[in-house]
Image (tube, grey):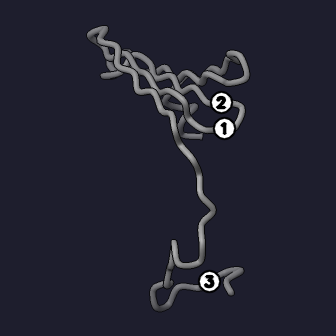
Amino acid sequence: DARQRSFVISEQRRGSGTVTTFKPKDPGAMIRNVSMTTGADHLIQRIEYTDREGNHTSFDFSGYHPKAATADTFQFTAPAGVQVVGGE
């Protein structure tokens, strides 16, 4: 897996959610670490990172209300010559 070749990945339970932390294996990387917090519903609640200068940035996500997709929400036509597997 490419992620495991490039990052040390750890997971930690926090309340009903999970914090997944990615730390680059390359000591010269522009980012020291990235953490993603997901809730019990598996939705992303927070992403935060620290750059190599020590600056910390975080993004909090809330108010997301997923809607069921309808047939007209997404339409895809396979390009000519492409085999469609399991298509209707």
Q: Nearer the viewer, mark 2 or mark 3?
A: 2
Q: Residue at x 71, y 31 (%)?
A: 40
Residue holding disc 3:
84
The answer to whether residue 49 is above or below residue 41 is above
Q: In the rendering, at what x and y percent does residue 29 appear?
A: 34, 22
Mark 3 vs mark 1, CA separation in Å: 30 Å
Q: Earlier in the sequence, mark 3 or mark 1?
A: 1
Q: Is residue 48 left or right of residue 36?
A: left
In the depicted view, which residue is nearer to us: 78 or 73?
73
Q: Amino acid at mark 3?
A: Val
Residues at circles 2 and 3 in contact by the CB criterion of under 8 Å: no
Q: Amino acid at mark 2?
A: Gly
Residue holding disc 1:
42
The numbered disc on residue 39 is: 2
The numbered disc on residue 86 is: none
Q: For mark 3, does the 10 Å Cα neighbourhood hold few (<14), some (14 to 19), or many (20 or more) residues?
A: few
Question: In the image as oriented, which residue stretches furthest toward the top?
Answer: 54
Quadrant of image for the C terminus:
bottom right
Residues at circles 3 and 1 in contact by the CB criterion of under 8 Å: no
Q: Helix, strand or loop at disc 2?
A: loop
